[in-house]
Image: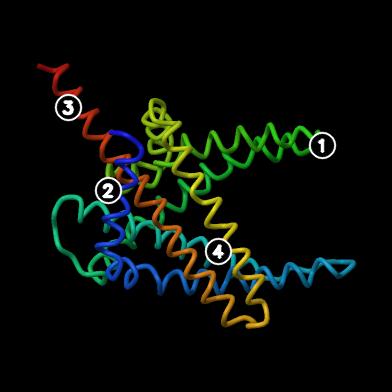
Amino acid sequence: MSLSAILTEAYNFFRNHVAQLASLTVPLLLIQVMIQVWLGSELAAQAEVEVPQFGAIHGAAMMVLLLIFSLLIAALTLYLEVRSRGHDVTPGMVLKNSFTFVPPLLLAGVFSGLAILAPVMLFAVFGPFWIIGLSISFYLFARLAYVNFMVIVERVTPLEAIKSSFKFSSPIVLKTMMILMLYLPLSMVGGIVIQLTEFGGFPLRVIIDTLFAFLGLFVNVALFRLYMVNRSTDDKESETTEI
């Protein structure tokens, strides 16, 4: 299936289910964004101090942020999986069943995140060569973009999910990279809107960030559609081989 067809189907799904998606994800996004904005302000304040001090509250906030993000991804992916099978569910049901996936998603996120960040951090030591590390990191990001789907849909362990995602994404890595690049215009527009409404303070910043974070979920929907299409193709090929 072409990339344009994938994006069209993802857009139609996002539009048709926007109310349920919002009721499922917006509360979690609000909490996540409030923590991010607060941490951002704390880091900015510490940067102006000669001896920065980060207390237990900052560490706890980071941990809560990771847990909320894992729960958000679990809930969204589970909802996409259930709806792709034609079942009707309520956001409450999805959220309730999402908690069991938080630990494996958290582990998978830590392992894959370290793998993605390693090249850019390594090449940053060599000055202008950081762009090479960034390119490698983006490539790894595309190869590991299906880890969450593997954990929830395939019900595999975090390490197996990382291996499976790397193998699964090989023939569709360019399409995956094109979908991931949708984050760029969203981030740019979001940044411009925040600058224009900077006078609004913390409440308005949280609302705007939450809105653009919700719109950014479209990327996850598009990736899931690409995943399901190619997963179905792989299954058919396996059945043909067995016959």
**Viewed as shown, does residue 6 lie left or right of 109?**
left
Identify the residue shown where x is 76% and y is 69%: 44
Within 10 Å of disc 4 (Cα), the crowding (few <14, some 14-19, many 20+) is few
**Viewed as shown, does residue 59 lie left or right of 125?**
left
Q: Amino acid at mark 1?
A: Gly
Q: Amino acid at mark 3?
A: Lys
Dot 1 or dot 4, earlier in sequence: 4
Foreground residue among 4 and 139 = 4
Distance from disc 1 to disc 2, alpha carbons, whole Å, reads: 42 Å
**Viewed as shown, does residue 21 lie left or right of 180?**
left
Q: How far across and down, in percent of the image, does residue 2 sit?
A: 32, 34
Which residue is identified by label 4? 63
Distance from disc 2 to disc 3, alpha carbons, whole Å, reads: 21 Å
Dot 2 or dot 3, earlier in sequence: 2
Q: How far across and down, in percent of the image, does residue 225 sit?
A: 30, 44
Distance from disc 3 to disc 4, alpha carbons, whole Å, reads: 41 Å
| Label 1–label 4 contact, CB within 8 A | no
Dot 3 falls on a residue whose secondary structure is helix
Q: Is residue 167 above or below residue 144?
A: above
Query: Mark 2 or mark 3: which is in front?
Result: 2
Dot 3 or dot 4, earlier in sequence: 4
Which residue is identified by label 2? 9
Q: Amino acid at mark 4?
A: Met
Assign the N terminus to one quadrant of the image.
top left
Distance from disc 3 to disc 1, alpha carbons, whole Å, reads: 48 Å
Dot 4 falls on a residue whose secondary structure is helix
Q: Is residue 110 shown to the viewer in this render?
A: yes
Which residue is identified by label 3? 236
Which residue is identified by label 1? 127
Identify the residue shown where x is 54% and y is 34%: 139
Foreground residue among 102 and 31 = 31
Dot 2 or dot 4, earlier in sequence: 2
